[in-house]
Image: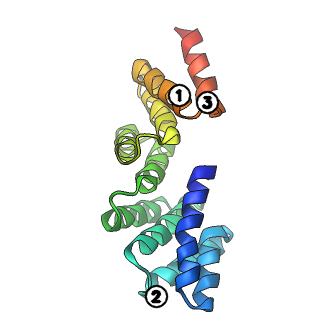
Amino acid sequence: MSASRTRFCALTLCSLIVLLAPAYADLAQDCNDGTLAVGIRACSALIKSGKLGTEDHATALMNRAIAYANTGRIAEAIKDLDDAIRLWPRNPLLYYNRGNIYLDRGKLKQAIADFAAAIAEDASFALAFLNRGLAYERAGDVAASVNDLQRAVELDPNLVAARDKLERLRTQR
């Protein structure tokens, strides 16, 4: 998980720790930082508790989806992200994470659409530009890939993956 995504998730789940009883604080911590199995169990318990606000519920769904994806439970991951997007459609991280799953699975149209949705919600989301650029390249649209990679580097000059991929594409032309 990127530093900005981690920071966002941590900040969102910090509200859970403050708002919920100590037992829930432990679940919130495990949902955010636990191993995959512990994270899935903790996020599931938080989701089932019925004590979360809309944004915290969506964040718990997203964290569980990431854990599901990392354990190969792709259908469950997509379902959780779909549910999270219905709850909090203005959160770019939800689209970004679902886009990553689609990209990993070679579903390039869906990935590009999700990265575009993330960018529409946050035009400064450098990682969404990077990953959409990677999806465009895999789809054979090198010009669109170069444009997105350039934008990613403009937004975050320290994004080495974008700089390196952009340089490789430019030398291949």
Mark 3: few/some/many CA within 10 Å (<14, 14-19, 20+): few
Residue contact at pointers 3 and 2, CB within 8 angstroms: no
Nearest the eye: 156 or 81: 156
Sequence-earlier tag: 3 or 2: 2
Residue 115 at x, y percent in the picture? 41, 42
> How much space separates mark 3 and mark 2, taking CA atoms?
42 Å
Circle 1: residue type: Glu
Element class at badge 3: loop
> Which structural element holds mark 1?
helix
Q: Nearer the viewer, mark 3 or mark 2?
A: 3
Question: Label 3: which residue?
Answer: 157
Q: In the picture provided, is 15 more to the left or to the right than 113?
A: right
User: What residue is pinned by disc 1?
Assistant: 154
The residue beneath circle 2 is 49
Query: Which amino acid type is marked by label 2?
Result: Ser
Image quadrant where residue 54 sits: bottom left
